[in-house]
Amino acid sequence: MNIKWAEKLRKGLHGSADSLGNLCVESFHYLALFGIGGITAWAAVVTFFGMLDKGSVNVDDILLLFIYLELGAMVGIYFKTNHMPIRFLLYVAITALTRLLIGDVSHHKAPDVGLLYLCGGILLLAFAILVVRYASYRYPSAKVIDASGQELEEGK
């Protein structure tokens, strides 16, 4: 019995469903990235104008702006390469812990074991960045694809 027409129809249906699914996922993906990028930019602007309105700036405020900058850079890199750079998440975590550490010290909080935990956390995150960088150097990805689906040359 010749049912090649059914196989051809199945493949066509599978291709259409795959394309429609990819369209939905990518649409949500870009909408979410625009939302995250917009909210990050808005939060940075509100923080900046809050500093101007306050009339003074402290290290906590500057480190908060660095966190916003790193989050914005992560969104931009994700747009360009379609990959989430884990190192940037680690940088954000280090900056947040540093901000917390400076806030504790500058408000004359008595040193306690919490200070050691913060410093240990920063050291652990720095070590994690070292491991991630070594692993990406030693075991690079087979290929890197940008947002348009084109393969990028290694090192770009």
Image: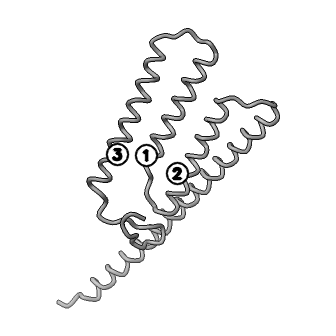
Q: Residue furthest left?
A: 1
The reply to whether the C-beta atoms of the residues labelled 3 and 1 are less than 8 Å apart is yes
First of labels 2, 1 by sequence position: 2
Q: Left or right: 124 with respect to 76?
A: left
Q: Report the disc number at residue 74.
A: 2
Q: CA distance from mark 3 to mark 1?
A: 7 Å
Q: Identify the residue shown where x is 58% and y is 40%.
A: 67
Identify the residue position indicated by label 3 in the image: 132
Q: Residues within 10 Å of mark 2 (few under 14, many from 20)?
A: many
First of labels 2, 3 by sequence position: 2
Callout 2, which amino acid? Met
Identify the residue position indicated by label 1 in the image: 87
Callout 3, which amino acid? Val
Q: Secondary structure at mark 3?
A: helix
Q: CA distance from mark 2 to mark 3?
A: 16 Å
The reply to whether the C-beta atoms of the residues labelled 2 and 3 are less than 8 Å apart is no
Q: Position of residue 91 (x, y in %)?
A: 48, 40
